[in-house]
Image (cartoon, rainbow, N blue to C red):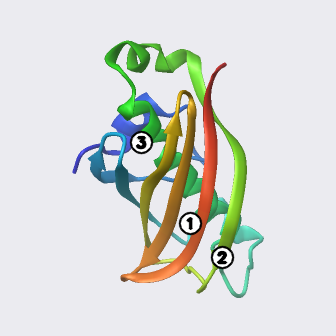
Amino acid sequence: MLYNVVEIQKILPHRYPFLLLDRVTKLEKGVSIEGYKNVSISEPVFQGHFPDHPIYPGVMIIEGMAQAGGVLAFQSSSEEDQEAAADKVVYFMSIDKAKFRSPVTPGDQLIYRLSVIKHRGAIWQLDAKAYVDEKLVAEAELKAMIVDK
């Protein structure tokens, strides 16, 4: 384990119920990150999606992958930039080639694996994939930018 949820909250501004990354297990600065989210029936989203057939929304999977990408971007920055992270936020610029391959349900553990396609300045382009039991359930190319709050 590299970062637990308390340490992730020191990096990202997200909080319950929108912090969608429970732990970071691998991180190679400027290259890749792996982390996970435990999907629980007690999450508020299941009150409406769907009460009798709970499916974790694809948009939440994409957001979880993006949050993992935010940790990668912030932790890949210089030490000075990391200290200034409290005054920064990561904004989505684009989501491309998104595909949802299999439903995610309560009790699943979503493993997020992201790798850097391109990084220039404050802009990050990432190949993002989500797995459950080593089965690919979602993927997308994400582009984001670190900006001042």
Dot 2 amino acid type: Lys
Q: Amino acid at mark 1?
A: Ser
Q: Few, some or many C-alpha atoms within 10 Å of disc 1 (few <14, some 14-19, many ≥20)?
A: few
Label 2 sits on a secondary structure element that is strand
Residue at the (41%, 29%) spot, across then down: 10
Q: Is residue 83 left or right of residue 43?
A: left
In this rendering, does residue 88 appear at all?
A: yes
From the viewer's side, name the closer residue of 30 and 36: 30
Quarter of the image holding residue 58?
bottom right
Residue at the outermost right position: 48
Q: Say which quarter of the image contains residue 47.
A: bottom right
Give the number of marks.
3
Q: Which residue is mark 3?
A: 72
The residue that disc 2 covers is: 99
Q: Secondary structure at mark 1?
A: loop
Q: Residues within 10 Å of mark 2 (few under 14, many from 20)?
A: some
Q: Position of residue 100 (x, y in %)?
A: 64, 79
